[in-house]
Amino acid sequence: MLRAEATDERSVLVHERLRFGEDPWEFMSELPTTDELVVLLLRTDWIEVHGGNVRDRAWNDEVLRRIALEYPDLSSTVWQMMSPAVTQRSPRS
């Protein structure tokens, strides 16, 4: 159901950009994927339930981790969306 909602949302984004005369070859790569939109919808729901604001980057990344655990099909998308500081490995000494 969430993917269907995200697909509809993505279609609206495409339609709006086309309506304003933008070239799809230029903007399609900029749009979030359906799975990215699903993660953003889940993140928004989580934030609304837990106070309505993002406290900091670490808190945001923790929300994304919870989404990855709860929805394993979205885990690769979540990891791609997390902040670079979290997803990069630190060099070993």
Image (tube, helix red, strand yellow):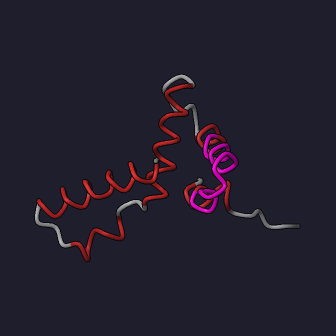
Say if 83 sits above or below 89 in the image.
above
User: With respect to residue 43, does 27 lie above or below?
Assistant: below
Q: Bounds of the magenta span?
A: 63-77
Q: Is residue 45 left or right of residue 12?
A: right
Residue 25 lies, in percent from the top left, at 25, 77
The residue depicted at 63 percent of the width and 50 percent of the height is: 71
Marks counted in the figure total 0
Left or right placement of residue 10 versus residue 14 in this view: right
Q: Position of residue 4 (x, y in %)?
A: 40, 53
Would you say residue 76 sits in the magenta stretch?
A: yes
Residue 24 lies in the magenta-colored region: no
Q: Residue 58 at what x, y percent from top left?
A: 64, 41
Q: Residue placed at 57% from the left, 60% from the top?
A: 77
State whether residue 72 is above or below residue 61. below
Front-most of residues 14 and 85? 14
In this picture, residue 68 sits left or right of residue 92: left
Instruction: Depth check: give the residue in front, 29 or 5.
Output: 5
In the rendered image, which quarter contains the C terminus? bottom right
| Outermost residue to the top | 51
Q: Please, which residue is most extreme toward the front here?
A: 1
Residue 22 in percent (x, y) is at 16, 67
The main secondary structure of the magenta stretch is helix
Q: Choose between 82 and 47: the one closer to the eye.
A: 47
Residue at (28% x, 58% y) in the render: 11
Measuring 40% from the left and 59% from the top, which residue is drawn there? 32
Residue most extreme to the bottom: 25
